[in-house]
Image: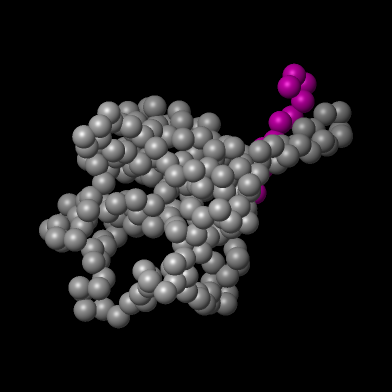
Amino acid sequence: LHHSTFIVRYSAYCFSMENEEALRSATTSRLISCLFVQKTFLREGHAKVLYMKPVIGINCDYEEEGKQPYSFTYRNYVEAIIAGGGIPLLLPIIKDKDDVGHFLQRIDGLVLTGGDDVPPQRYGRERHNKTLCVHPDKDIADNLLVSIAIHMKKPILAICYGTQLVNVVFGGALIQDIPTSGMSCIVHKDVGNKHYLHPVTVEKRSRLHEIA
């Protein structure tokens, strides 16, 4: 772009979903509206606006018990991003800080998927007997990924385990098993409600209300 000014403006549109189970269903394409990158070229006083598909990174799950180790993600995460106008890019286990930084420089937003639990030692607690931790390599990689993404101010959509991960990276703790904690809670896995849906009220004048 010789002799021209190149301006990139990032416009974040809300990522919305009803829950992780719904995101994996066949109808989730309507639930996510992706970040887009608006590029404006100013040449000789004339502006030309180009809309480019955003590249959205997805952190992969990881398994190795009794099989060849492999990274994966559920197909509906990918399909939801494509349906929302984005290009999905899967991120396997990477534990090198510089490599993670290079990856994040090449994406416009990040989806943190659902999965098993954040290891309680991350927030200074003993492990509950119902806690099923993610693989140690995934734990290291995901913590590094989120920490650097936050530092770089990348837009993040966090789902289930991803939300818990972000909370812990910011210094928060978790209740490992709500049903046995004595706290009242909504029953999400009701056998009569196969999609595990429940209504949510968004408070007016809240940040979420402004986005939604």
The scheme the figure's colours follow is: one colour
Q: Is residue 189 above or below residue 148?
A: below
- Whether residue 36 can be seen here: no
Expressed as whole percent of the image width and height from the top left, the position of residue 23 reads 50, 55
Report whether 132 appears left or right of 145.
left
The location of residue 46, given as percent across then percent down, is 87, 34
Picture coordinates of residue 42, whole percent (x, y): 80, 33
Task: Between residue 187 and residue 151, name the one nearer to us.
Answer: 187
* Vertical order, 187 against 118 (above or below): below
Q: Is residue 1 left or right of residue 116?
A: right
Percent position of residue 100, x then y: 40, 32
Q: Which residues are magenta?
A: 1-11
Pick the quarter of the image with the N terminus: top right
Q: Residue furthest front?
A: 192
The residue positioned 32% from the left and 43% from the top of the image is: 143
Tell me where residue 128 sits by quadrant. Answer: bottom left
**Residue that appears at 37% across and 76% down:** 186
Judged left or right of residue 65, residue 210 is right
The residue closer to the viewer here, 119 or 47, is 119
Image quarter for residue 172?
bottom left
Q: Nearer the viewer, residue 193 or 81?
A: 193
Look at 51% across and 47% down and name the residue there.
76
Q: Main secondary structure of the magenta part?
A: strand
Residue at 54 percent of width and 38 percent of height: 88
Q: Is residue 26 visible?
A: yes
Q: Is 203 or 139 nearer to us in this picture?
A: 139
